[in-house]
Image (spheres, grey):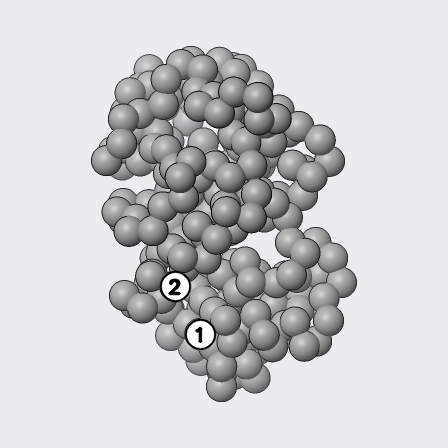
Amino acid sequence: MQAPLAAHPNPRAGVAPLLSASGLACERGERRLFRRLHLTLAPGDMLQVSGPNGSGKTSLLRLLAGLLRPAAGSVHWHGPAARRLLWIGHAAGIKGLLTAHENLSWLGALHAPTARDAIWQALAAAGLAGFEDVPCHALSAGQQRRVALARLYLPGGPPLWILDEPFTALDRQGVAQLEQHLAAHCAGGGVVVLTSHHQLAHRPPAYRELDLGQYAA
């Protein structure tokens, strides 16, 4: 594993950031999970968040996505592009009574209208060819996860991806395919923030790791 981020990580001076956080702290009930966290993410970056159970990995992602209010500090999205982020949580977040195609049509519309052909192509890219019209409650856990992840294959999506345990329930082939797709997104100027215990075999040049255990309160 690579060394944790420094206090003000900005490894590529001169590259305009997409997202930054300063003095970030998070509390759950009366317990403070982490504090004094600073980070800067620019196009091309991939940040993998690790740490012990209960260290606040999911909470940090929710803070960066604007879904949770910090106990201290602030999160800044730089420019309108950064506010077009894509969040995929630990749960699949799909509707069991809808088919894979219907779910992706609905999820894709959260960001922009999506052509029908693009929906079919994204499902195929996610490994769901032949399952497009199957109700999601009849799919396996891995296939349901692929339905949620198919959003990553839609064209014209947000540049900032925040993904909580994206490799959950995927087989070895699915993990390798997703790794390559995440690296390609960064190579195209996107940013990926993810939590995972998985050791990535495919990493973009601007890959870093944040060990939340280093910031325990």
Work out whether 67 lies above or below 111.
above
Q: Residue at x 57, y 43 (%)?
A: 189
Write down the residue under mark 1.
127
Eye-nearest disc, 2 or 1: 2
Secondary element at tag 2: helix
Q: Residue at x 33, y 15 (%)?
A: 217
Q: Amino acid at mark 1?
A: Gly
x and y percent of residue 145 in the render? 43, 64
Q: Residue at x 50, y 71 (%)?
A: 125
Q: Amino acid at mark 2?
A: Gln
Front one among 120 and 105: 120
Disc 2 from disc 1: Cα separation: 9 Å
**What numbered label is drawn on residue 177?**
2
Front one among 52 and 196: 196
Work out whether 93 lies above or below 189.
below
Q: Is residue 210 visible?
A: yes
x and y percent of residue 26 in the render? 45, 23
Residue 61 is left or right of residue 114, and the answer is left
Work out whether 211 lies above or below 159.
above
Front one among 181 and 103: 181
Q: Is residue 21 visible?
A: no
x and y percent of residue 24 in the render? 48, 18
Q: Residue at x 49, y 13 (%)?
A: 23
Work out whether 31 lies above or below 194.
above
Secondary element at tag 1: loop
Q: Are marks 2 and 1 in contact (CB under 8 Å)?
A: yes
Work out which residue is located at the far right of the displayed protein and give it: 113
